[in-house]
Image (tube, rainbow, N blue to C red):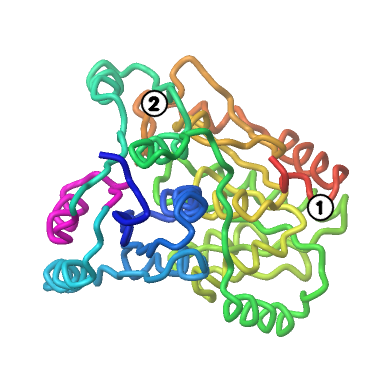
Amino acid sequence: MSVTSESIDGFLIVRLSSVGDVVLTEPVVAALRERFPDARIGFVVKRRFADLVSGNTEIDHVHLLESTRDGMRRLGAELAAASYRTVIDLHSNVRSRTLCRAAAAERVLRYRKRNRLDGFRVRVLKRPFRAPQRLVVRYLEALEPLGIDGTYRRPRFHVRPSDATRAEERLREAGLLDAPLLVVVPGSVWPTKRWPSDRFAAAVSEAARRWSLTPVALGVSDEHALCVDVVSGVPGSWNAAGLLSLGESAAVIARARVFLGNDSGPTHIARALGRPTVAIFGPTDPGQFSFDGCELLYADLGCSACSFYGGRRCRLGHWDCMRSIDVEAAVAAIGRLVERGRGACASS
């Protein structure tokens, strides 16, 4: 069935979590708005990730999944009342499928999560994972029935004005409003995706000394001690872990002279903001993403990438994918971005 202006009415995008995955849905919103400029576009996301999409003015309404016992039921009723004609499921799990049914749309488009054989190869046969295409492309391919091309588009991040204002206030309070910031995010949900904290600390200290950068560490409250280890050795640095909202953290990243982080959500935010980014990958495949114009540190060992998401420990016991990335490599990568200028990643 072809989609005409009379049959549009509304599109509902469903991506419940997590930070990086939600950030990478932005090209889908942009493509829909470009193809159907007068369409109504809604977005479903967990409340704690709302800051990632609420600044995007191309989205007409953000529907929030609350972490309450009746959150799914209430949201389902809300979606049914909204009467969207087309739902685009970019999560493709049990909850997203349940919400798609509740929306009672005329059609549901769903992205292809991955080849089913990949799960068998990685989890059972213990073979390295190599992504056949970027995640953004797989998202966009879900729109092909709407006449939208699946060619890669770089995600953009839209900072809310209120978050930008609050971030500016916090930086002013810290005496860093006009400082050249080295924003560092040393944490990750999965331990195997965290480059060792002593190496982060050494790289941050050396980069700050060489290029007169001021380190700012970001993270959740549980990562405060980790961030102390990373930035406390540099006079004038600021450990903001646990002090900012997700949207405010994005607004601070938007001011970064250089960003340094693991394969985690804030790294994708930095990339989407066009900030000069150094991304450190180990057990996961960076081929799922684009770091053109930025700096990727990835050992690409024979056992890499051993996981889709990361894990609690290296299954081979050596963790060489991260240990083989030394401090000098990170410092050199930061230096290349400093020398190339502020817009190093903006156009790629």
> Which span of residues is magenta-colored?
87-105
Give me the residue at 36% from left, 33% from top.
Answer: 308
- Please state which amino acid type lies under the numbered disc 1: Arg
Query: Residue 222: x, y in percent?
Result: 43, 65
Name the mark nearer the viewer: 1 or 2.
1
Residue 285, how many percent across, how many down? 47, 29
Taking the image as shown, residue 80 lies to the left or right of residue 136, namely left
Determine whether 336 is above or below 82 in the image: above
Q: Which residue is mark 2?
A: 306
User: Left or right: where does residue 188 sit relative to residue 88?
Assistant: right
Residue pictured at 45% horizontal, 54% vertical: 36
Q: Which residue is mark 1?
A: 342
In the rendered image, residue 237 lying in the magenta stretch gets the answer no
| Quarter of the view holding residue 15 | bottom left
Residue 259: x and y, percent?
68, 52
Q: Earlier in the sequence, mark 1 or mark 2?
A: 2
